[in-house]
Structures are given as C-alpha cells and as structure tokens.
Image (spheres, rainbow, N blue to C red):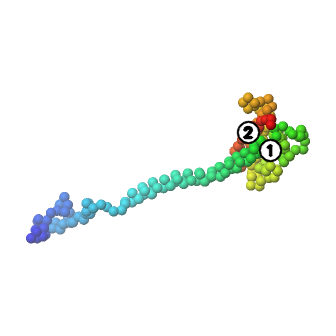
Amino acid sequence: MWANELSSPARRPSPTPWGRLGGGDSNRLHQVVSFPTNKRQAGITLVELILFIVIVSIGLAGILSVMNLTTQHSADPLVRKQALAAAESLLEEISLKDFADPDGSEAGETRPTYDDVDDYDGYASTGIRDINDTPIGALADYTVSVKVDAAASLGALGGGKVKKISVTVSGPGNEPITLDGYRTDYAP
C-alpha cells in the first residue's frame, strides 16, 4: 500500500525543491541524480594533484641547486689540503736546518745542499718538489715561495736570535696559503 501511494503522481514528493522540471509534458517528472554526501570521497582532485606537483618541484629544484653548488666546489678542499701539506712539509724541512751556516760558505748551494735556514730565503718553485729537488708530477700546478726574516723577534728574544720563516703555497685556484714558523738560535 505504501508503494502504491508513492507511485501515484499526486502524492509523489518532488525530487527538487522547485518542483517539476521541463516543459511540455506536465505529467512527466524529471528525476535528479545526486551522489550520496554522507560517504567520504576517495582519491584526489586534479587541482590537488597539480598543487602537489608544483610544491614537490620547487622543493626538488632547491635541493638540486644546493647539490650542484656543492659538487662544483667539491675539489676545493682537496687543493687546499694539498697546498697546506706541501707548506707544512717545506716549513718543517727548513726548521730542521741549522740556525747559522755551519761551513760559512753559500756559494753554489742548491736545495739538496742547503745547510741552514738562511739558504732558503728567496727560494721559489713552480711545482712541488721533494727534498732532493725532484718534481712531484701530480703537484705541478702549485707554486712555492719562501721568505726568511733574520731580523725577526719573538717575545723577549730578538737581536739575531730569531728567524721568521714564511712559506707560501698557491694551488691551481691561486688561493695562497701562508704558514709562518720561527727558528731560534738555541745553544746546546
């Protein structure tokens, strides 16, 4: 009985708030199809997808630019460390020599025959060389210069008892590294 009541056109509720739709045949009702609103929608909309892609793209662009910058300058610390190691090695070599010339002669000396600190004053080389003045092939792009200041003072020491040694090494990027050391005249 209830189904019969709904099927009669006079008692059927209107599917829309404005009543019957359409024109022409007034006995015919147009039904409006609607989706249930009480269930959650699954998935994402196209707008949400585009926003997600844009945000992720901006984040990736930032990360990749930092990585690119890091990769471009990744060899710089290696060049600096090699220049520092060469400067430390030469400074140690000079510091281990005698304070004053033991034989009193400076004529015809080369790096392998240097016997005192003053012999290194003005030493310069293109390419790093070992203690025997043999070039090291992998370090050919480096330059080395040495300055010895015989009139230096160190605190209360002075008056010819202190020599300041400055070793400067430049790598392929022309960034100079200068190490200073002092050699004192100590009596045994």
Residue at (90% x, 42% y) in the render: 107
Asked which quadrant contains residue 122, the reply is top right
In the rendered image, the quadrant that contains the N terminus is: bottom left
From mark 1 to mark 2, how far is it between C-alphas? 17 Å
Q: Is residue 57 above or below residue 91?
A: below
Q: Is residue 82 above or below residue 179?
A: below
Few, some or many residues within 10 Å of mark 1 (<14, 14–19, 20+): some
**Residue labelled with disc 1:** 124
In the rendered image, the quadrant that contains the C terminus is: top right
**Amino acid type of the residue that numbered disc 2 sits on in the rendered structure:** Gly
Residue at (77% x, 53% y) in the render: 136
Where residue 78 appears, as percent x and y from the top left, is 67, 51
Q: Earlier in the sequence, mark 1 or mark 2?
A: 1
Of helix, strand and loop, which one carries label 2? Answer: strand
Residue at (70% x, 43% y) in the render: 177
Of helix, strand and loop, which one carries label 1? Answer: strand
Q: Is residue 57 visible?
A: yes
**Residue labelled with disc 2:** 181
Left or right: 148 as drawn, with respect to 45:
right
Left or right: 155 as drawn, with respect to 18:
right
Where residue 28 appears, as percent x and y from the top left, is 17, 68
Q: Is residue 109 above or below residue 38?
A: above
- Marks 1 and 2 in Cβ contact (< 8 Å): no
- Furthest toward the front, the residue is 188
Where residue 53 appears, as percent x and y from the top left, is 45, 57
